[in-house]
Image (cartoon, rainbow, N blue to C red):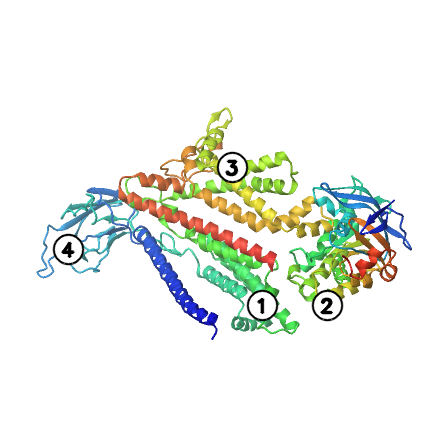
Amino acid sequence: MKDIDKLQKRNRTYRDLTERLGSTGLAVSGLIGLLFLGVLVWQIAEPTFISGEEGEIPAASESIPVTDYILKWDFANVDSETGELTTEPIILRLTWEDGGGEQSHDLQVNIIEEKGVTKDVNITSDGLDSEIVEIGRKTKFYLYSNLEVIVEVEQISGPVPSADSNGYPVVDSFVVSGDIHILSDDDGELVFQPLELVGYAVLFLLIIVMTWPKVGALNALSSLQPYRRFIRPVFYTISGMTLAISQGMFVAAALGAVCWALSGVMLNRILEGMERLQNIGRELSETSRLKHSISNRDGLLMWSRMLFVTSTIFIPLLIDIPFLTERYQDIFVPYASGIRAAFFGTIWVMLIAMIVSIPISVGAAIYLEEYAKPNQMTKLIQALVTNLAGVPSIVFGMFGLAIFVKQGGIGWGLGPSVLAAGLTMGVMAMPIIVLAGQEALRSVPRSLRESAYGVGCTRWQVTKDHVLPSAMPGIMTGSILAMSRIMGEAAPLVVVGATAMILFDPEPLAALSGGNAEFTVIPIQIYFWTQEADPAWHSMAAAASIALICLLVAMNSIAIVLRQHFRRRLNS
Amino acid sequence: MSEKIGGEEVPDSTRELDVDGEIDLMIEDLDLWYGDKQALYGVSLPIAKNSVTALIGPSGCGKSTLLRMMNRMNDLIPICHYDGKISMGEVEITAKDADLVEIRKNIGMVFQRPNPFPKSIYDNVGYGVRLHTKPSREELDAIVEKSLKRAAIWDEVSDRMHDLGTSLSGGQQQRLCIARTIAVEPDIILMDEPCSALDPIATAAIEELILELKKDFTVVIVTHSMSQAARVSDYTGFMYLGRLVEFGETDKIFSDPDLELTKRYITGRFG
């Protein structure tokens, strides 16, 4: 054996060892990290979204305009052996005013040692369905009511709960549950009709089949081949029916109808592709060929995917998540608050910023990259744009304040309004989009331009037919990322004048029509909530953060889907 | 006037050259600079109609530049400027106010690397036609089919007209580019080393195609392959250091060149 072999052998053992150690270490630390993240998310999400949160016991009387309550005590007041009360009885007095005048009912709550025992109480117009309930320690029980009234809950006797080291009462809280009615509205009615849901599922399956064609699925579909010419009429009919039998929820019905129609076209496309393959004597198992012959034609698959992804992401808007789309901020009760105003404020600010900034910035990028002569002036503009992209956002806020908000001088006098905020954010996004757009345009290969000029294109034809489509993925990704950046930005809007609390939907054009133009956005709402002394507001801020992150993820996934589609189209 | 290049007296490249038959394109005394660097020195060259003219010469001798000058492709390079005259019948190509779109429609170009548009095969061919005319669906279908047939690629793509042009193989892509070029029915087709990125079989297919195209079009081809120039061309110009050193019928250039320089290059004894 040669010396080098011996050395190598020893080295190999060492290498294998480090390799194994390293990868195991990475895997373990990755898992720990994931676990940690999961716990973190759960810690934030669980109390606020899923079960409500321990918080301050309200003052003796609290009027909460929502009719479901969760209550929880963390000690027993029933002796487990003798069954006798060890403390004064806990008595809640529930009062409300309905058609039959003022009603007042007392409810005794006995708490036993055993956890997990629970009993719900229904509040009806005839009173309570039980006068005494027995529940476990640290266990939630619910007060329900279908009455459209304000039920006041008052504890009139019973032990005062213990406080934690900060002096805050920690348990025994009155909590409004974050009740999420999935696929149903407030009255428990289904938002989606079954037909719409089926259409949605069919579309999903077809997208899967089209994206990853598998022989099994295709064989199953091939039995439909004799009926190919009926498929589209049938699907269109179902689509029409979906619309016809919809009950009020137009958005859901329209979504279902579009799903059915798209499914029809897609199924037809798949069968057509299979037929074409068979005509030229190919096997179904050549799935890559099939993929080629069915997709990539007019973006059908992309539009279906887009529809599917966006509707899946935005279905929560159709579903009732009270926190997001229903509740305004409540002045006194954290858990009765929501971010409806901030949510719509964010959407409006973003839309205005998008409308203002994207066309201008893409135009500027095209001018700088394709048209401008490479002289000193262009270099200066380029340098300015590059530097502008790095300017702190608060400076843009000052700019917006001077130009859009203030009256007189160069000011447009829009006041602290959605419009002024949207314009400010639009200005902030512009340099980012210009730079991303330029980068994308620059990466279009010269050969593409040459071939276009070679067949006799004018400069504009080259730009619009060839360069711009090729640069589209980059431009769109840049734009959407710029939009998600401004969505999370709070500083400029503090300057422009976002409000801490508004109790109505912001109107985008109120500044022009003279209406009430006050607005707020989610980051500002988070900021103000964290300023509150009561820790209960902090968990509301955490919930709002999660909502903001979900919006960002939604935006970025749209960017990814778009980019993947266009990239595939250019590269395959 | 003559210069001494490569140890040999070379005749002035602005000298009058002649070809048999009708002259399609005439280049007269063309100088060209990239910034300060001169790339072409007083080149004069006649291109005969319905023939294949090959330009050969070592890398950097200006043959691609000369070719790209014929349809003003060099205008895309900002630092490029020139002096001299290129004319195609009545039309002066080098005129300041020349209609570049019209020129490039009449003088098509096939590039070194196949560069189909990232569109469907059908659109690749139809795009140029739609750019210049407003054909009906049937007319366009007919033009696309005819062009693909003339480019000898119809049989391979007729069942996949809506696939991407970029999904074809290299040789097919190059023939697609040729189809794209002939779809707008130019008078002249310029080919800039069309086979340099292709394997021998694809090269053979393209060469066969060039001989076929000669019947309807005038072809100017830049090539690095001596044998290719000998096989496909009727006239050959040998360029060296920005000058057109020798020009004549291909048979003559390859069998009995006037200059020792040309002979050395052709036989591969270039030093």
- Residue B177: % across, % down: 72, 58
Alpha carbon separation for disc pair 3 and 2: 55 Å
Relative horizontal placement of residue B129, taking residue A335 as reference (left or right) = right
Q: Nearer the viewer, mark 2 or mark 4?
A: 2
Q: In front: B181, or A273?
A: B181
Residue drawn where x is 58% and y is 49% of the image: A472
Q: Nearer the viewer, mark 3 or mark 2?
A: 2
Chain of the residue where label 1 is placed in the rendered structure: A
Q: Mark 2 Cα within 10 Å, few/some/many (few <14, many 20+)?
A: few
The residue carrying mark 4 is A76
Circles 1 and 4 on the same subunit: yes
- Residue A433: % across, % down: 54, 43
Circles 2 and 4 on the same subunit: no
Identify the secondary structure beneath mark 3. helix
- Kindly indicate whether the residue at mark 4 contacts the one at mark 1 (C-beta within 8 angstroms): no
Would residue A248 be seen by someone viewing this image from the given angle? Answer: no
Residue drawn where x is 81% and y is 64% of the image: B231
Chain of the residue where label 3 is placed in the rendered structure: A
Amino acid bearing label 3: Leu
Amino acid bearing label 4: Ala
